[in-house]
Image (cartoon, rainbow, N blue to C red):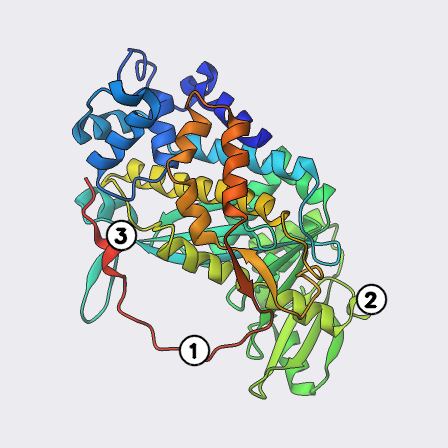
Amino acid sequence: MLILTTLRAMITDLDFQHTYRQKLTDFSRNRTLSFPKIVVGLINLFNRSIAVELTKLLGHIHGSEAPFCSKQAFSKQRQKLKPEAFVALNDQLIQQFYADGAFATFHGFRLLAIDGSTLQLPESSEIVQHYGRSSNQTACVPMARCSLAHDILNQLTLHAILTPYRSDDRTMAWQHLEWFESDGQARGKLDDFPTLLLLDRGYPAIDLIAHLQRLKINFLMRISSQSSLQEVRDFAASGQSRATVTLNVTTAKRKKNIRLQTILRQLDQAPLVVELIAFDLPDGLKAYLITNLPAQQYGLDFFTEAYRKRWGIETQYAFDKTLLEIENFSSKKVEGVGQDFHASILCRNISGLLNLDAQQHWVQPQSPTLSTKPFYRVNRSVSLGLLKDELVDMLFGNQSVEVTYDRLVAQVSRHKSLSKPNRAFSRQRKRPRKPQINRRRAT
């Protein structure tokens, strides 16, 4: 509630508006679609017809005397807004959320996961020139690549990246870490709260491991038995269940790794000591983990359970693409795509805060991070639907933020769904590329 009050104040603040407009002359005249209305409208998600969304937006703000505004006027006005405005608002939301101190942890650790995905974009020459295409035997479509640094237990995205399709997940992971390191507030959060970073098999590399050691970030990665790291291949061949290994940084190939050698100098040539862990999967195969946490102190169950929770970022992508409709872009311009992407992340984070408060209305038999018994969660799809349009009242309307938010919490808390930990499903063949709903024509 206090977070939304802060966001509302930021959106209407003149300094904020001057910082995130494209030119000095933008939003200087008294137009129907002012800076705050554009920002609030995009956060509220333009998933339906733009003309319908504009009519509803102005109706919520002005009531029965709402002025008319065409979608062409909206498209022209939104070009004056920098996408970074939504990034700044999300940064403020995240900072204030962690400052309150009441957030879920796993054995005292905040679980962060980094993972990437692809997003299908509207067809336009500007989009294709900037983001590129993905092609196969049957289709050639505009595509971008995105990556999230996501708090799994609290269902909040700290940092989101949207890049051209030819980017790769490991490069975007470095960008996430650079953001954590360069942003003073974000870097402070890493220092203030014990954090465990979860990464999938595509990420392990010796320079990334060294960088995480330099940043003093605890990590847990799954790694292939055929990894490029010779130490891991030797461990997999040995048949051991656990080993403490010092990575050899003196090989000829690693001496040529400029980034690795730069990081080692910053570490004063300290040895890279990691723990390797092997465990059995339900199908009888072996899986391997690499971490910089002491294995003897935490035990095998801690690592397997913590890594299993990494699946939360996969289900988050499923939610974003199907229910949030993050690929349902309302613009065919590069700036507009960036606005829609970051506004969707901010809207989903606000919905996540609403869910956390609604969850407090129920008495759970045990913490879901430790229990193997079924427990109840907020129905996120219902929560997102109830939040639609109410966001306009909270961030711009005449109603009190407290009254609207408390009413929403009460409504959301009535809708819950049963969650069963440790469920497993066989992998199914993928359906056609995108559902029809995500092919709405952008303008």
Q: Are marks 2 and 3 in contact (CB under 8 Å)?
A: no
Quadrant of res 143: bottom left
Foreground disc of the pair 2, 1 = 1
Specify the amino acid type for callout 2.
Gln
Residue 183: give x, y in percent of width and height: 59, 35
What element does badge 3 sit on?
Answer: loop
Q: Which mark is residue 267?
A: none
Q: Residue furthest top?
A: 29
Specify the label residue 132 is tagged with: 3
In this figure, which residue is indicated by the disc labeled 1?
427
Q: Which three-letter amino acid code belongs to the residue tagged 3?
A: Gly
411 or 431: nearer the viewer: 411
- Whether tag 1 and tag 3 are in contact, CB under 8 A, the answer is no
Left or right of residue 18, residue 432 in this image: left
* Quadrant including the C terminus: top left
Question: Residue beneath label 2, please?
Answer: 297
- Which percent across, then down, holds residue 144? 33, 52
Discs 2/3, front: 2
Residue 328, position as x, y percentages in the image: 29, 48
Q: CA distance from mark 2 to mark 1?
A: 34 Å
Q: In this rendered view, identify the residue nearer to me: 222 or 396.
A: 396
Q: Tag 3 or tag 1, which sits nearer the N-term?
A: 3
**Number of residue marks:** 3
Q: Residues within 10 Å of mark 1 (few under 14, many from 20)?
A: few
